[in-house]
Image: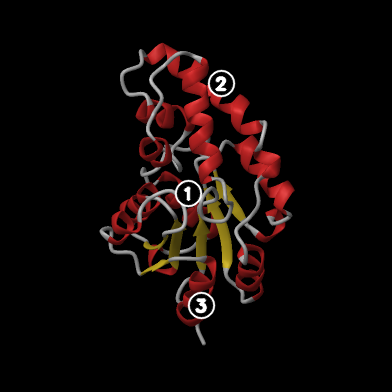
Amino acid sequence: MAKRFELIVFDWDGTLLDSTAAIATSVQAAARDLDLPVPSDERARHIIGLGLIDAMRYALPDLPEHRYREVANRYRHHYLSRDHELELFAGAVELIESLASAGHQLAVATGKSRVGLDRAFAASGLGPLFVASRTADECHSKPHPQMLLELMEELGVAPEATLMIGDTTHDLQMAQNAGVACLGVSYGAHPREALVDLAPVFCADDVGQMTAWLRENA
């Protein structure tokens, strides 16, 4: 059967890697270190998927601009102290392997830095299965469509043959801005209702549901 989606692009944190809690608590710890107002859990989770400085701007909107780099550095300290403990969601490895075996081109569009994504690729062992990737220090932050537009151009795939998968409204809005279909996952950073409001082709509550939908529809 012909593939509906030649290119499937995954977000990383909260979609393939179970890192939502680590990211949110690292933002809050950074604020405490600097005696700043500590963002609520909801606000801290909402930043996931954004580039680091944009994330700090959202988490601490009243901070003078020149201090965001300082907060970002403290965030990195806390996150890097525990990122080696983080694990992929159950079933994620098997899903990526099956999609690659079925002939789909796989890519990543992430709010991580290039150094962070390369480290995640190495730790997970999945790097060789992704044919291309874009990070927040190489492109505009989500929901700007640059990451997806560059990936489609690099791989020669049309928007109608591309699917973006992510756990945040930033991911789904990026897909809309790029003119591609999107699939939401509700087990990550943003609530299911917010994802469904953006009309994804499907909203999966776990990796198993996502795998089943992709097997039948991708």
Amino acid on which the number 2 mark rests in the picture: Asn
Q: In the rendered image, which residue does mark 2 sit on?
A: 73
Q: Earlier in the sequence, mark 3 or mark 2?
A: 2
Residue at position x 42%, y 44% in the image: 146
130 w.r.t. 116: above or below: below
Amino acid on which the number 3 mark rests in the picture: Ala
Left or right: 134 as drawn, with respect to 179: right
Q: Which circle, 1 or 2, is nearer the viewer?
A: 2
Residue at position x 51%, y 45% in the image: 20
Q: In the rendered image, which residue does mark 1 sit on?
A: 150
Residue 14 screen position, x and y as percent: 51, 51
Q: In the rendered image, which residue does mark 3 sit on?
A: 212
Residue at position x 31%, y 51% in the image: 177
Report the front residue among 212 and 38: 38
Q: Are marks 1 and 2 in contact (CB under 8 Å)?
A: no
Q: Earlier in the sequence, mark 1 or mark 2?
A: 2
Residue 72 screen position, x and y as percent: 51, 23
Residue at position x 45%, y 76% in the image: 4
Q: Quadrant of residue 62?
A: top left
Q: Residues within 10 Å of mark 2 (few under 14, many from 20)?
A: few
Cα–Cα gap, marks 1 and 3: 28 Å
